[in-house]
Image: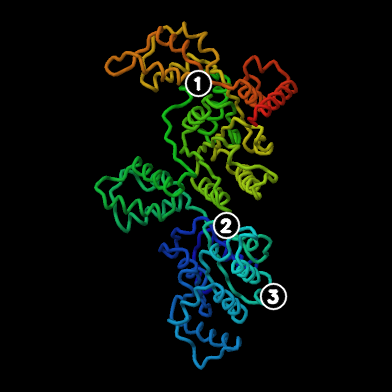
Amino acid sequence: MAEVLTLPPWAEEIRTKYETGAASQFLLHTNIHDVYPLGGAYLRLRDFLTRAMAGGPQMLVVHYNLAEGVSFPNEVMLREFLTFFAVHESIAGRPATKPPAWETLQPELRDPRLALPMLGRLLIIRNNIFLFIDHVEKIAPAADAAGLSMDDRRNIATLQRWGFEPAFLAKNNFVILVSEHQSAVHPDLWRGNPQLDSVPIPFPDEAERRRFIEAALHRSPLEVEVPPPRLAAVSAGLSLVKIEGMLKQARRGDARLTVDEVVRRKNELIEDEYGGLIRVVEPRHGLDAVAGMEPAKAELRVVIDAFRRGDAANCPMGIGLIGPPGTGKSYIGVAIAREVGVPIVEIGNLRAEYVGQSERNSEKVINFLESIGAVAVLWDEIDQTYGQRGERGDSGVSQRLWGMWSKFLGDTRHRGRILVIWMTNRPDAMDEATKRPGRLGDLKIPIFYAADDPLGVLRIVAGRLGARLPDDLTPLSDLLTDYSPAEVEALVTVARRTAPRENGVPVFSSDLLVATAERYRPTRNETMIEFMELHAALESTFADFLPAKYRSRTRADMEAQAYDRRLRLTAMGLM
């Protein structure tokens, strides 16, 4: 390669492995729809790689995808290919007097049944070929054997041969396969293939975003209220293409580009891109709005301070909030995330109906979380989506999800940068390795059904719902003793319907609240609640997180009681 260009690290890795013979095939995935810097310009992936890797005078550059078929960057390479094709046809017993017309041939070469074998022969007979195959998941999809057509199987076998047979390996050729998701490509291509290297293209880091923003503003000035370094910081998680689109949109409008505007547009782009997989959370309350739980809040403030100081060694990998429904786990999780002071995202349902989609959803979310920088991740009902080790009758989906997320969440490089705040009412349904210390179990906080401070919860809920309480709440103390936070909120909602109003504000009297509490009947399954509380108590990191009734029990006693409650619930048909 005559011209030595400065490349991004992932591209330099590809060039080094190719030049040293460590690999000749590469599967590129993740941030494949971006632009990449090369020689002062920003290029799309195919053009970037063609220029960066295929600059030698003897190199024949060939592009292929289902939509366009086979194509070439210039006429010289096209003519060489047509000459080769005529020879190929002659060997196959279909001699031609002259090379075929490209207008006739090109539509036929969209079909991988024709294109792949022909490209394979080209790789055998010629050196210095740069072959770029886009959307490889369309011709070699990741599916169970029963779900693959004969054409799919033939395509997979053809592509496999390129990485194993000596006739292919003897040539100095360069094959690039591209797919947004590695998991969408049949694993036979990227597992156990010594000549194929799977390379994720990362989302741009802060320094790359800053260089791009500075270059874009230099080319086309735009009035902004913040300097490029700040814009680069708040655009974490976005590709350069998305940032460019944001700048173009700002140029078309009249408003100046502010940090708030960048954050707003960024959140919109993220939610549009990831659909229901990720939701950006804008919290309105912190730990001061959480009633009771003083020992747990004291511990949380210690670890939150470690995050703020950048003391990664003393930051937990995960914080678990464990307890029955209606206890305010999600509310507390948001409060913790706000105190940490970093962007907050909530993981949605990763499971999908179609084969392989659950794995692709997880891969997409993991890639995003690794790209966004410091972030707090809220994960409700983690037992429902995380997956488990071992077979569960779902064709191995749970096991594969467990493997993907366990690798990500066990990566200690994320400590102090990615904080996962997870919630569950069924920790017994989670794999033990998932909730161990060093992964998600560094700090596990039990949340019990009865509010620790029901009157404190009442004050917070009334303030949030815009209701005025009486100064003296003593008459309610005994009535709300075993109420959950959700039941306290339901009580306030019921009372608000009949409360008199002053300037539109509901005004609660003691008599109204007492009458409502005496009339209101919470619906509960006490056996289910006790079962979930016992498991929450068993998971607690510290003894002082437990109320007295659980603190005095031995672990063996609580395990026996949890087993007894499970049997009862099974008899009820609830488990």
Give me the disc on residue 485.
Answer: 1
**Location of mark 2 (residue):** 182
Classify mark 1: helix, strand or loop: helix
Q: Is residue 462 in view from this perspective?
A: yes
Q: Amino acid at mark 2?
A: Gln
Classify mark 2: helix, strand or loop: helix
Q: Earlier in the sequence, mark 2 or mark 3?
A: 3
Q: Name the spot of residue 343 as percent of width and height, x first.
A: 46, 38
The C terminus - image quarter? top right
**Location of mark 3 (residue):** 166
User: Which marked residue is nearer to the observer: mark 2 or mark 3?
Assistant: 2
Q: How far is mark 1 from mark 2, CA to CA?
A: 44 Å
Q: Earlier in the sequence, mark 3 or mark 1?
A: 3
Classify mark 3: helix, strand or loop: helix
Q: Is residue 11 above or below residue 223?
A: below
Q: Name the spot of residue 112 as percent of width and height, x first.
A: 55, 72
Q: Would residue 497 appear left or right of 59 to someone viewing this image?
A: left
The N terminus - image quarter? bottom right
Q: Amino acid at mark 1?
A: Pro
Q: Amino acid at mark 3?
A: Pro
Q: Name the spot of residue 514 as percent of width and height, x first.
A: 44, 9
Mark 3, other Cα within 10 Å: few <14 / some 14–19 / many ≥20 = few
Judged from this view, the residue extending furthest toward the left is: 254
Q: How far is mark 3 from mark 1, CA to CA?
A: 68 Å
Q: Earlier in the sequence, mark 1 or mark 2?
A: 2
527 and 321: which is toward the camera: 527
